[in-house]
Image (cartoon, rainbow, N blue to C red):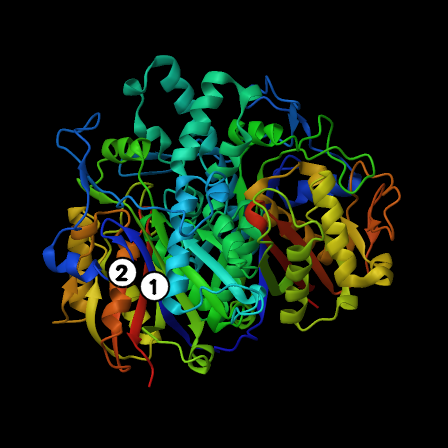
Amino acid sequence: MSRAVVTGLGCVGPTGLGVDRLPDAMDAGRPLGSVEPVGAPRGRRREMRVARIAPFDREPFIPARKLRRMDEVSQVWTVTCMLALADAGLDDLQPDKALYRPEDRATFLGTGFGCVAATWEYLTELTTDGAAMANPFLFSESVANAPAGHSAIEMNARGPNCTLTCADASAVAAVAAGARSIQDGRAEMAVCGGLELLPSPAIEALAALGAPGFVGEGSVALILESLESARSRGARIYAEIAGQASASDPRCGPWEWSLDADRMSRVLTGAARRGGGRSVRKVFLHAGGFPPAEAAEDRAAAASFPGVPVVRPARVFGGMVSAAFSLALGVLDSSRQAPEESVVVSAWAWGGGLYSVALSGAPD
Amino acid sequence: MSARVRIAVTGLGIVSALGRDRHQFWSRALEGRGGIGNVDLFSTAGCKSSIAGQVREEPGSKSDRTEGGRVHRASRTDRLCITAAAEAVEQAGLAPPAGSRTLDRFGVSLGTSTAGMLEGEQWVRDGVDRGFERQRVSRVLRVPTSTPGDAVAAALGTGGPRLSNMTACASSALSIGQAADMIRSGEAPGMIAGGGDALCLMTYAGFNALRLVDPKPCRPFDATRQGLSLGEGAGMVVLERWDHAVDRGAEPLAEFLDYGATCDAHHMTAPHPEGRGASAAMAEALARSGLRADQIGHVNAHGTGTDLNDATEAEAIRAVFGSEGIRRIPITASKSMFGHALGGSGGLEAVVLVLSLIHQLAPPTLGWESSGDEAPPLDIVAGAPRRLSCAYGMSNSFGFGGANCSLIFRTAS
């Protein structure tokens, strides 16, 4: 079985393009970008705030003629992939220069909300104008795997392509699946990560459902390669995906997070154990903004890794998308650690899914 | 853990327009009965077609469970998936409460594409008619594509890994492959895997807008085919480590060998003209299963009935199995019986393939009369079931966004 290592990071978020400012945002305790108050959506007394992605020019990454055929979500994800490839030194995709064959490039995208803006627009048009006027472009862009399909076309990635939809833990589920594809030899290189954009219909729904007052948008992509391939090309290795574990709480309802600290603890320690029992130095908590679930998570982390520092990226980047930022921050943190040390990233999904990955420092 | 961990199929569940369970489905499939008829779930006004493979018997109950006085309303897709999963679990000898302890370690891997969209559409219609401020958002809790997997896990009490994917028409085939990966990596001893989708106007009107539907029941691979017929349903399998199944006294029905997953990276809604990604998925599945192409004795094709899809799949099958090889591989296109259940189709067709291997019978493809001048022609099973004599079968699923997945199963013996 191959070992999966992280060699590239891409990010489109409130801090702008790239991951450099993410630690600064954590230090500042705010996203360093646009935080938009969205008033008091219907049925909610207090305001919600949304950490929006910072505006950016897409044409340096995607030709204008192609941008016109992509929904916003696909544009953001594709640019994120391009940034990650460039960071890994794999952005030259010319057939005679690319390091990996198209067949060996995989895509695993995690998203809980998917293409909600296109879906909403398509559905309302369908309702008001009738089926005879259905817009084929909006229909194809409303499919949640459209971003992964578009990015695969741009990257000529002909390996496995999958869109994981595990609610607000989708990013971690996608990275775990991407690592598995490297470990099993299904791909030599995998672009994986998470993406959420929150247009007004999504915010309205979140508000009415009692979501936390602070939610965020963003997109994070990791480049995974086998350790052997990364070494052979002399790549900079940020971290290793050392272990992963998942479980679920069947008692959760459709808009509920698990309160089962014991199950959470099994997932946290499971990821660390599968990572070879390395010393855990930090835990990135989900902390999605639901006090009872956060309390359970705190108990689980304390029981699993007594005395180990915890961080809560959701407080800075907002709920719903925080798992993606936790991954980026966890990778950056691991890059400064020794191979025998690890950080654990946890993500708990509405509906009861529990996911965790352990990241360790670059192997010697 | 070794990648060569053997994986047993110990349970099958299927609900479709052709029947409410595997017994009803299989007897009707062998009789050559079709399940495609008029749609009454929503108005098809303005569409070229008015038919689909609609499940006539209301699946499951209106609510999936009641707890502490709260009733969690299940979507039609949830209910289809729960119904199929419950059947599979029962056949595997794991039905709660007796199987609850084992199920607490089992996971769910489920693929879907529409999830609760049927209910979401009604919410939007009501909102447009009466104002959205009057609509309760709790009615759209079941729209996200993660929810059918959550519903199955909640209904059966599975506490192991949970994975949901929405990879268009390859969703539930991928969910079966990924479930096997999780078992082989030691993350769970067993998984309930597959998927389902309910009909909804969004996809119905969308495929109409793309001019991909046939106003008559679809005729996959037939020379006169004019498009697909949409459908709905769910197909679920219980996968578990072979030794785990044997140790608890379960009888393996078949063995899941491996899968191939690829992407066309060509076009969002059209397949690669030479079936590049499709043939790569089949070749990958064969290679990872340690098989030669000539060892496959039956293919359950993706076979949607659209001109381009069937032509490229035929081209891909020829590329993998060779001009001579395809003459001895009977091919069934199950969508002719129950329509194209989109994200659920891979799960449905995996169940059909396993039933075919168990009974050594390939059910007929409905509506097929001739492949026309396609050369060399595929050996389409039509008119009557065909006796098989094979150990290995393949099921193909190809989707929007260029995602492809081929699964390979083997007889239990």
Circle 2 SS class:
loop
- State which chain disc 2 sits on: A
Residue lying at the far top of the rendered structure? B130
Residue where numbered disc 1 is placed: A9
x, y (%) of residue A300? 20, 62
Is residue B63 rendered to the left or right of residue A260?
right
Frontmost residue, B335 versus B223: B223
Tell me whether the residue at label 2 lies in contact with that at label 1, contact meaning CB atoms closer than 8 angstroms. yes
| Label 2 or label 1, whichever comes before in sequence order | 1
x, y (%) of residue A347? 29, 57
For residue A53, above or below residue B177: above
Q: Distance between the residues labelled 2 and 1?
A: 7 Å
Q: Which residue is drawn at 27% across and 57% down?
A: A325
Frontmost residue, B100 versus A108: A108
- State which chain disc 1 sits on: A
Task: Name the image quarter holding the C terminus of chain A.
Answer: bottom left
Is residue A303 rendered to the left or right of residue B31?
left
For residue B125, above or below residue A188: above
- Label 2 packing within 10 angstroms: few (<14), some (14-19), many (20+): many
| Residue B64 marker | none
Q: Which residue is drawn at 64% across and 32% down?
A: B53
Pointer 2 and pointer 1 on the same chain: yes
Circle 1 SS class:
strand
Frontmost residue, A10 versus B118: A10
Count of numbered circles in the view: 2
Residue type, mark 1 in image: Leu
Residue B360, quarter of the rendered image: bottom right
- Label 1 packing within 10 angstroms: few (<14), some (14-19), many (20+): many
Residue where numbered disc 2 is placed: A19
| Residue B157 can be seen in this image | no
